[in-house]
Image: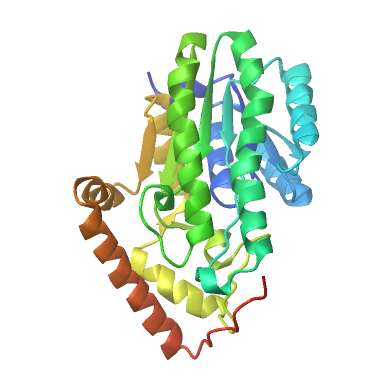
């Protein structure tokens, strides 16, 4: 089955669809003939992207959505079903990041990440899964991260949330099979998107960290272009792959983690030490410990 034949005429709902991976997925899916719905808090940006897709001959619309609100999520899904007749592909993609080491967090750092990355993903499933069961078909694709498969110091809250998404996706894939509903999980490596420097709703928690300094650290991981990621990702979804790791070279580190967790921890610790050294060289100060 070609990518085009998999998506042509199908309805694809994408949360976090206004920018980054979500926007790249939207463009690729529309080019394959899907009817794309961009759901995002940044509704004006989503509307601009939808207009651009339509001007290129695709089918797209924007919907305002905060994934932390279950009732809003249900309303968006109901509106999509009413207008388009169903939801065939649900890209459960909205996410935020909190950077810095745990000693630099306050309670909000945990809440911000868990509310969007875990609760928001669960709410999306709560709204869409019953629709797909009634349809007798559908594909849920949750966006996790390579940080959901590997130890990731310096992003512990984010990594914790993405491990949860991986676990959710693996379990739901097994349950959903009897309903002819497929479930996959994206575990991207470093993709060149706004989230690398915090994004619209994320934060670094590191005092004095500039975008330039942050990007210098990320460049060590060879960020992949978001459009290139999306092209490979939707091909993997069409093949119904369960855990989709892109770029492929990250699979080596994932394999090491499964074969030798101790070695994986040593590699991650060395990476943390290099990042600390780069931040210190850039004059980034370690902040005061937050109050409980």
- Relative to 240, is 17 on the left or the right? right
On the image, the x and y values in percent for residue 140 come to 53, 27
On the image, the x and y values in percent for residue 279 come to 45, 83
Q: Is residue 170 visible?
A: yes
Residue 19 drawn above or below residue 67: below
Residue 278 drawn above or below residue 217: below
Seen from the viewer's position, the closer of residues 181 and 232 is 181
Residue drawn where x is 64% and y is 9% of the image = 134
Q: Is residue 57 visible?
A: no
- Relative to 58, is 227 on the left or the right? left
Image quadrant in which you'd find residue 87: top right
- Relative to 56, is 166 on the left or the right? left
Seen from the viewer's position, the closer of residues 128 and 148 is 148
On-image quarter of the C terminus: bottom right
Residue drawn where x is 45% and y is 45% of the image = 163
Seen from the viewer's position, the closer of residues 147 and 225 is 147
On the image, the x and y values in percent for residue 221 come to 35, 64
Residue 239 drawn above or below residue 43: above
């Amino acid at each position: 089955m070609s990518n085009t034949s998999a998506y042509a005429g199908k309805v694809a709902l994408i949360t976090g669809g206004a920018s980054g991976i979500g926007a790249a997925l939207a463009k690729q899916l529309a080019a394959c003939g899907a009817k794309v719905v961009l759901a995002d808090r940044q509704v004006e940006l989503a509307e601009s992207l939808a207009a651009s897709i339509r001007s290129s001959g695709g089918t797209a619309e924007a919907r305002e959505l905060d994934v932390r609100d279950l009732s809003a999520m249900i309303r968006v899904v109901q509106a999509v079903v009413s207008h388009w007749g169903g939801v065939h592909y649900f890209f459960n993609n909205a996410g935020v990041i909190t950077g810095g080491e745990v000693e630099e967090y306050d309670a909000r750092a945990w809440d911000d990440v868990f509310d969007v990355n875990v609760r928001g993903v669960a709410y999306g499933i709560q709204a869409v899964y019953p629709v797909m069961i009634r349809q007798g078909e559908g594909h849920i694709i949750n966006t996790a991260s390579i940080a959901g498969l590997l130890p990731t110091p310096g992003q512990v809250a984010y990594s914790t949330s993405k491990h949860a998404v991986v676990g959710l996706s693996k379990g739901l894939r097994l349950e959903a099979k009897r309903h002819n509903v497929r479930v996959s999980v994206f575990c991207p490596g470093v993709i060149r998107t706004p989230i690398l420097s915090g994004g619209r709703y994320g934060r670094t928690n590191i005092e004095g960290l500039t975008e330039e300094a942050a990007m210098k650290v990320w460049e060590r991981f060879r960020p992949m272009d978001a459009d290139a990621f999306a092209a490979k990702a939707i091909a993997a979804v069409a093949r119904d792959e369960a855990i989709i790791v892109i770029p492929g070279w990250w699979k080596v580190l994932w394999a090491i983690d499964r074969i030798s967790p101790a070695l994986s921890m040593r590699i991650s610790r060395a990476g943390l030490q290099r990042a600390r050294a780069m931040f210190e060289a850039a004059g980034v100060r370690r902040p005061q410990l937050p109050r409980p």
